Image (cartoon, rainbow, N blue to C red):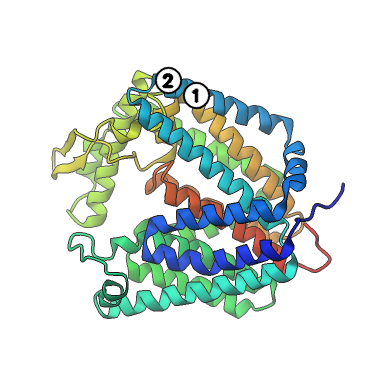
Amino acid sequence: MTIMTSRNPQLLGGVFVACAFLAPIVSYFRHLAIVPLCVAAALGAAIAIGPEAIRKIVARTPGNLTLLIGGWAVLLLVNVSRTPDFQVGVYSIAKFTGTALTVFFLTFGASLLPRAWARRAIIALSISVSIVTVLWVLDMATAGKVSFAVFERTVQDNYGFFWFKAAATLAALMSLILAYAAWVDGRRILAMTIIVGLIIFLACFKSRTLMASVPIAMLIAYVSLKLGRHRMRILFGSVIVITAVIVGGSGKIFSAPDVGRVIQGNSSAALSVIYRAHIWEYTINLIREKPILGWGLGSSRYLGNKKHLMDPRVGFVGEAIPSHPHNVSLQILLETGAIGFGLFLGILYLLLSSADRGFQNDQIGRFQFITIVLVIMMLWHFNYGAWSTWWLHDIALTSAMLIVARRGFIAKTDSS
């Protein structure tokens, strides 16, 4: 098989170095700023790669993956004609398509990046994450005065540092990649320091889901290494089984008020769990009304946003669906039905299985890859929307930077 190269390696390298340096900083500035940055980087990568290499990689796409992507595209077109809000459906398809292209060009470009440029990109990323960490520490010490002065933020009494949630997520994912690069570069103490520092950082920030997801993901990733080539089947099988139990048992075996009775206290964490239980129950009831094709892409934005939920113990908990159900599986089932859910999982399974096989004997790389996948899956199932633009671009950048780290810090004889 002919080894593909980019048409302009210098341009490609410059794009990734700039993107690696700017991404954490602009995300700290404003969470949506990551979107135009990634789009610009993807465009630069596409130009640097050239049409010939793009045609070759498209021609090499496996037939089963092409079939699933085609089925997904057809389903989205059918769904947009059924959605009560046609404009929202069209906008959602356009946004999803644009994001998919951004992911493609960023990850493909990363796979063609020369080793020297890949190392520079990781160094730039480490500097950027360090700058964001310093800014965060200064903000914590000054009650946000640094950011309020530099970025002209407004104080949100109810949320405090909620505006940094997106930046903390990106910083955490990038830190996992930096730890991997440090480890394979022989700097193991530095790698462990990054991981420990990351957990302390998240604990101070009080990002509960993100803080818990990192050690849990690392533990499961370690166990998964013992499962051999079936690890991805077990992971996706678990997602299907858990989702089926939640959808099938909600309101029958258990209910949202049950959660409110079991979880005592009115702390932020308790109320968050209770609220999600009610959101999920409301979403599941809608799923049962249209289980095959769903309500249409983007329907989460208007289904339930005018209805308020009440818990028997704590009272008012919030909107029925605050723009999305805070669970990727339930959102896809709600909007695209069981058919869409199956197609979406099939595409993800083929992509992640192929990536997993690509690590071959690099067990450290595979461990970090699975850790990052699990962190993303946990955040996707408890915090973020399925199609939240900034979150999808965070995933795109994370995928690209993991590839960059491998190209920059694996053995020189390894051309994978």
In which image quadrant can residue 324 be found? top left
Mark count: 2
Determine whether, in the image, residue 184 is placed left or right of residue 223. right
What label sits on residue 205 in the rendered view? none
Residue 93 shows in the view: yes
* Depth order, front residue of 18/163: 18
Callout 1: helix, strand or loop?
helix
Residue at image position (30%, 73%) is: 147
**Foreground: 213 or 10?**
10
**Kind of residue at disc 1:** Leu
Q: Residue at x 41, y 72 (%)?
A: 200
Q: Is residue 364 visible?
A: no
Residue receiving disc 2: 81
Q: CA distance from mark 2 to mark 1?
A: 7 Å
Could you classify mark 1 by the number of other residues whose Cα lies within 10 Å: few (under 14), some (14-19), or many (20 or more)?
Answer: some
Q: Are marks 2 and 1 in contact (CB under 8 Å)?
A: yes
Taking the spot 68% from the left edge, 67% from the top edge, the residue there is: 118
Q: Amino acid at mark 2?
A: Ser
Q: Nearer the viewer, residue 99 or 196?
A: 99
Name the spot of residue 89 as percent of width and height, x first: 40, 29
Q: Is residue 95 above or below residue 249?
A: below
The one nearer the camera, 249 or 60, is 60
Question: Which residue is identified by label 1?
Answer: 77
50 displayed left or right of 246: right
Q: Secondary structure at mark 2?
A: helix
Q: Residue at x 22, y 50 (%)?
A: 271
The quadrant of the rendering that contains the C terminus is bottom right
138 is higher (above) or lower (below) than 30: below
The x and y percentages for residue 329 are 44, 36
Percent position (x, y) of residue 155?
20, 66
Q: Residues within 10 Å of mark 2 (few under 14, many from 20)?
A: some
